[in-house]
Image: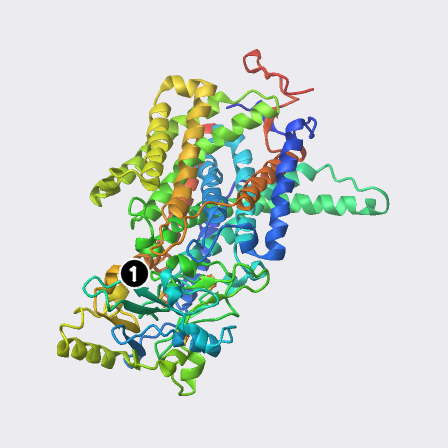
Amino acid sequence: MVSYMKPAPITKKYFTPGVFVLMLIALNGIAFLLGRLFFGIGAVTHLNNQYPWGIWIGVDVAAGVALAAGGFTTAALGHVMHRSHYHDIVRPALLTALLGYTFVALSVSIDIGRWYYIWHPMIMWNGSSALFEVGICVMIYLTVLYIEFLPIVTERFINHVNLKGIFSFLNKPIERLLMLLDKGLSKVMFVFIIAGVVLSTLHQSSLGTLMVIAGPKMHPLWQTPILPLLFLLSAISVGFPMVIFESMIAARSFGLKPEMEILSRLGSIVPPILGIYLAFKLGDMFIRETFVYLTSFNTQSVMFTIEVLFGVIIPLRMFLSKAVLKSPLWLFIASCLVIFGVLLNRINNFVTAYTPPYSFSSYFPSFGEISVTVGFIALLVLLYRLIVFNFPVISVIDRHYTPRTKYAIRGSEQ
Amino acid sequence: MEKQSRREFFKTTAIVGSAIAGLSSNSTKAAPKNILSEDRMGVLVDTTACIGCRSCEWACKTAHGIETQSLEKYSDRTVFKNMRRPDVNALTVVNEYANHQNAQLPTDVKIQCMHCDHPACVSACIVGAFSKQENGSVIWDTKKCIGCRYCMVACPFQVPSFEYNKAINPEIKKCDFCFERTKVGKLPACVEICPVEALTYGPRNDLIKIARERIKRNPDKYFDYIYGEYEVGGTSWMYIGNQDLRNVAFPKLGDKPAPGVSEAIQHGIFAYFVPPVSLYALLGGIMWITKNRKNSEEE
Ligand code: SF4
Ligand code: SF4
Ligand code: SF4
């Protein structure tokens, strides 16, 4: 156990040149977002009656949900299976999931034509709609994520409530309230943790059911009744690579040493899951004999090949190698490939595969659409940074613990 | 996690489980109106009779308050050079297709919502804004719609269109089978105006008989196929013509209802919430066992 590590707010400078670049990207996205709000979806996107869904659904929503899967996979590993040596990564993964889903919800609201009716599904139910199920599950799961995050907030403020001036009389009661909340939460938290895992498996798979109803409008390389299973498996398999990816980026930008011990262990869990996913993907292809479509050269066949080769087969081989698991650089590259594979898979399912019988031109996202998508990602990173600077999320060296030289961490505390 | 007695753990798990199960009994009832009446109405489109005058386009716009040119201007046949699709300003359009058997007799096909017997749009809509009415019409409810456009993704005939250029209250537009007119006993506007009776309005079952009869009486004139009789489980609007319409105006579709597979999956995953609840119980069990093991290891 690496008990000398303890989650704590990062103490560094928030503003760096990189942060300013991100802010510019975010502002550009917000500008187009305002355009959409004031002039309608048609003003900023290339969507039309032939292509009703574009990258706001394919990337922001579908890929966003998949890439936030690290939250429920680590929760399952750390809390449900009680593998405590993973505890250091549960919080960062939780935060990513929380922000990820928040932005998924935001993206959905701007993609739908009547954003002010986003609450309609709560009271107007259609049990046969896959989208309804995704919507409801995501709403509940988002709430669960916020509840799971609460202990981090109480931990931050217990013993630190310090209101000044006329509000100072509130310090004691707030403190007591936080204590009470903290105690109550830790008693029932397991309910939410399990619920979070169940809700995730549900909507991760229903996201796959979404396109099933499009039937022949979807290219046969992707259209299959086992789409929900493929979506679930790929979401689970991208969970840990995503955690590895974030931990390494965070370690780098906060000047910490990547926790290779945990990350390699995580990496070693990837191959079986990725392998099962690949088996189903290829098995499905052979059963439905869709490989014939690969012999013709077009956007669909090329995208499918890239997705499976670079997004699944190559990283699978990499994760199987001991040398890759031990090397931070190669582990990072392998994780990036899995992430790329799932991202591309979602884009393919929702955009590339969608080939309506009557169309006047094919769909390619507009500059505005890309700006909003990229802007949201920048905003997400900025928020992440802001939160880890103020809340105990990332594990750093515990000040009250004498570190062994073996684990000395380069420049973590100044 | 705090220490917790085994009883307490199971109690809480059980309460949550039954709460979810309680939800399920409601949600199985929560479905939009989707009636398949024996006497549902339909329209038989005899494309061999259609002269491509496009009066129906004009009548439809007029009946739905869409701005339009005067009826005379519709005789302009140059519009047939391009394929057109129904959109927010035209709930129905007529396209002309070459006829390779007889170049003198091109095939004019009026296109609008097919009013499916098992509509994908009704099954897909997240809030149940679409419904299939007793008289066969598939209609849309502006009070519910959130503008997600999933209906457009789902429709196998690629019919619903969306007002992309409206910032506030954009609508989904499609042929509503003139629901407001038929309710008060009037004919659909397009059927009423058609000068050559290419459109026949009547009970769907009778229309199939009429279509069979016409094909039988004139086997040289017709290609022996009723488009819409079985497509995606049958549609209220059906077509006959001088050539196989699946090659020109319509997609080749199977006879299985479009929502079939996705509804089967959906109901499989959610069969009375048994799968989610069992998963919940299973995870709870694992959590409890691993926690006990950890505790005993630490002692
Ligand atoms: S044609 Fe499309 S819009 Fe019309 S009823 Fe069928 S699925 Fe719905
Ligand atoms: S756009 Fe409106 S009618 Fe269509 S599926 Fe969404 S909520 Fe339903
Ligand atoms: S039935 Fe009514 S709405 Fe539909 S095409 Fe005819 S006139 Fe238009």
Which quadrant of the figure has residue A357?
bottom left
Q: In this orientation, which residue lies closer to the viewer: B30 or A378?
A: A378
Residue at figure coordinates x 54%, y 27% from the top left: A249
Image height check: is B295 above or below B101? Answer: above
Residue A406 is situated, as x and y percent measured from the top left of the image, at: 54, 12
User: Helix, strand, or loop for circle 1?
Assistant: helix
Q: In this orientation, which residue lies closer to the viewer: B110 or A176?
A: B110
Q: Is residue B74 left or right of residue B200?
A: right
Residue at figure coordinates x 43%, y 40% from the top left: B287
Residue A314 is situated, as x and y percent measured from the top left of the image, at: 34, 27
* Residue with the mark numbered 1: B260
Q: How is the image coloured?
A: rainbow
Residue at figure coordinates x 67%, y 35% from the top left: A390
Image height check: is B20 above or below A282? Answer: below
Q: In this orientation, which residue lies closer to the viewer: B254 or B21?
A: B254
Residue B140 is situated, as x and y percent measured from the top left of the image, at: 45, 70
Residue A183 is situated, as x and y percent measured from the top left of the image, at: 61, 44
- Ligand 1, what quadrant? bottom left
Cβ at disc 1 under 8 Å from ligand 1: no
**Counting other residues with Cα less than 10 Å from the Cα at mark 1, is it few (<14), some (14-19), or many (20 or more)?**
some
Q: Is residue B45 left or right of residue A134?
A: left
Q: In this orientation, which residue lies closer to the viewer: A405 or B55?
A: B55
Image height check: is A370 above or below B164? Answer: above
* Amino acid carrying mark 1 in the image: Gly
Q: Is residue A164 left or right of residue A209?
A: right
